[in-house]
Each structure stands twice: as C-alpha cells, then as structure tokens.
C-alpha cells in the first residue's frame, strides 16, 4: 500500500513536468500541483484545471476532474470528484464532494450530487444527498440529508438525524427532534414529522 502510494505520487510529479504550463493568468491547464498557493504552485490561482489538482493548499478558478488536497479552494465552479480535508467551492458543484476524512465541504452555489464531510454547507440548493455530522442547505434541499443535525431552508425530500429543521417545503423528517414549519400535524414532533 505504502509503495503504491509513493509510486503514484512519483508518477504524478513526472506527469506534472510534462504538462505544458499556462502562458497567461486565467488560462486552462491539464493539472495543477501545489504546496502553498500562490507561492509554490505549478499553475496560477486564476487558471482553471481540466483534469487533476493535487495540493497541500491549492487555489484555482474552476476545477473539472479529480481534486485531492488538504485544503482546496475553487473560486468558480467544480465538476468531478473532490477528496479534500477542507474543500471550498465558491460557485456551483457537480459530483462527489468530500470523503469520510473531510472536515468541511463548503459550496457557495448549488450542489448537484453527493457531499460527505463532518460539516457540509451548501449556501444555495442541494440536489442529491448530504452525509455528515452537520448538514446545512441555505436554499432548497431536494434529496436526502443524513446527519446528527440537518437544516434546510426548504425541504423537498428526507431528513434523517437527531435534530432536523426546515422552514418549509414538502417531505419527511425522522429523528429525535423534528421541526417542520407548516407541518401537516405540529411544527415540532419527536420521531417523525412531515408535510405533503
């Protein structure tokens, strides 16, 4: 396992040396490798990555493909697989965001797909699923939230957790405390609450 990781890292570094460097800021690059953006970074922070980003701390405009970082910041949109300790996407995201080692997965736009982290924050809408200790959707959650605490401004789906909160929409909550504004029964109920 350790040998395959070292071999994979060496192969990635060799591939990085053969990738053509973007000529101007704001260009698109195949891959980016970064120890600390922007000081020790192959591409510019304003460049978009089309295939792969590997970073201790990396920052790029848009990322499409695979993103592996301790801290990864995407100033625009993301599409693909992100496996970061802390992942920040300021735009929209499509794909799988986070992993079970991720501390925070933050999406500033709409998240379409699956997020898994200790803390998941989707500032706008979620179309898919969130798995974590704390799941927060600032807009409409269409799909499933599984966690200890789940919050959605509007729910169109299912929340399963110890505490579930939504201020509107349609769906089902299963947990110890369930707050559903406009519920068919009561706004606050233990075990299960709903509005259809």
Image (tube, rainbow, N blue to C red):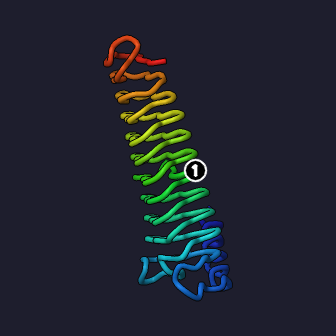
* Marker count (numbered): 1
Residues 185 and 81: in front is 185
Residue 149 against residue 41 in the figure, above or below: above
Image x and y of residue 120, in percent:
42, 46
Secondary structure of the residue carrying numbered label 1: strand
Single out the residue that lies furthest toward the top: 185
Tell me what residue is drawn at x 39 percent, y 42 percent.
138
- Above-or-below relation of 111 to 81: above
In this picture, residue 79 sits left or right of residue 87: right
Residue at x 49% of width, y 76% of height: 46
Q: Is residue 46 above or below residue 67?
A: below
* Residue 68: x %, y % from top left: 54, 64
Classed neighbour count for the residue bearing mark 1: other residues with Cα under 10 Å, few (<14), some (14–19), many (≥20): many
What is the quadrant of the N terminus in the image? bottom right
x and y percentages locating residue 137 in the rendered image: 41, 41
As drawn, is 186 to the left or to the right of 159?
left
Q: Residue at x 43, y 59 (%)?
A: 88
Determine which quarter of the picture holds residue 11.
Answer: bottom right
Residue labelled with disc 1: 96
Residue drawn at (50%, 80%) of the image: 44
Q: Quadrant of residue 90?
A: bottom left
| x and y, in percent, of residue 20 in the image | 66, 85
Residue in the foreground of this view, choosing between 181 and 133: 181
């Amino acid at each position: 396992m350790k040998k395959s990781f070292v071999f994979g890292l060496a192969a990635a570094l060799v591939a990085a040396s053969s990738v053509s460097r973007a000529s101007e800021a704001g260009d698109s690059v195949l891959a980016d490798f970064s120890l600390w953006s922007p000081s020790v970074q192959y591409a510019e922070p304003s460049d978009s990555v089309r295939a792969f980003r590997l970073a201790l701390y990396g920052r790029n405009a848009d990322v499409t493909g695979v993103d592996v970082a301790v801290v990864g910041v995407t100033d625009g949109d993301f599409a693909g697989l992100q496996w970061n300790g802390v992942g920040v996407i300021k735009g929209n995201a499509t794909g799988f965001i986070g992993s079970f080692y991720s501390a925070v997965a933050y999406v500033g736009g709409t998240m379409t797909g699956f997020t898994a982290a200790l803390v998941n924050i989707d500032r706008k809408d979620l179309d898919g699923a969130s798995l974590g200790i704390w799941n927060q959707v600032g807009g409409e959650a269409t799909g499933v939230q599984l966690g200890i605490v789940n919050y959605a401004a509007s729910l169109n789906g299912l929340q399963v957790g110890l505490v579930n909160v939504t201020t509107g929409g349609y769906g089902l909550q299963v947990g110890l405390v369930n707050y559903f504004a406009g519920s068919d029964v009561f706004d606050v109920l233990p075990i299960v609450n709903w509005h259809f």
